């Protein structure tokens, strides 16, 4: 279900059709398990009149997941502003 929703939302973003209103209710929850610190990260950010949602699984550390949570939505937003073929941003 989660993957299907993700693919559906991506197809909405890159399609030529216009949707007047799409409302998504969302929440965020984390579970640290037995580690001393949380390695996973998430992002919810407004970009280009839309929302960017991402979950980064920090296998073996939090350096990559932290970097992505801080930067990927910005890179993606910049690509969407400058690229006419939106599929290339993915």
Image: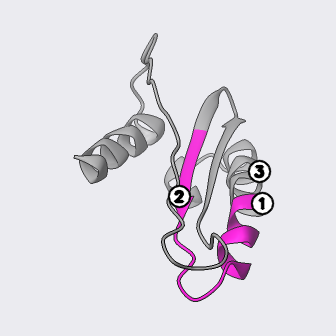
Depicted 15 relative to depicted 19: above or below:
below
Q: Secondary structure at mark 3?
A: helix
Upstream in the sequence, badge 1 or badge 2? 2
On the image, numbered disc 3 is attached to which residue? 78
Which residues are the magenta region? 52-70
Q: Nearer the viewer, residue 76 or 43?
A: 43
Q: Please tell me the numbered disc located at residue 70.
A: 1
Q: Are marks 1 and 2 in contact (CB under 8 Å)?
A: no
Q: Nearer the viewer, residue 59 or 53?
A: 59
Q: Quadrant of residue 89?
A: bottom right
Upstream in the sequence, badge 3 or badge 1? 1
Relative placement, left or right, of 31 versus 7 is right
Residue 33 image point, x, y percent: 48, 71
Q: Secondary structure at mark 2?
A: strand
| Cα distance in 3D space between marks 1 and 2 | 12 Å
Residue 69 image point, x, y percent: 70, 60
Residue 46 image point, x, y percent: 70, 34
Q: Please tell me the numbered disc located at residue 53.
A: none
Mark 3 or 1: in front is: 1
Q: Secondary structure at mark 1?
A: helix
On the image, numbered disc 2 is attached to which residue? 55
Q: Nearer the viewer, residue 69 or 86?
A: 69
Residue 56 is a magenta residue:
yes
Residue 18 image point, x, y percent: 44, 19
Label 3: how many Cα within 10 Å (few below 14, some 14–19, many 20+): some
């Amino acid at each position: 279900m989660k993957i299907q929703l993700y693919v559906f939302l991506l197809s909405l973003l890159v399609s030529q059709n216009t949707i007047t209103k799409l409302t998504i209710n969302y929440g965020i929850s984390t579970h640290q398990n037995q580690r001393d610190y949380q390695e996973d990260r998430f992002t919810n950010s407004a970009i280009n009149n839309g929302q960017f949602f991402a979950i980064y699984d920090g296998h073996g550390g939090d350096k990559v997941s932290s970097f992505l949570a801080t930067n990927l939505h910005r890179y993606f937003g910049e690509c969407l502003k400058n690229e006419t073929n939106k599929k290339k941003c993915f």
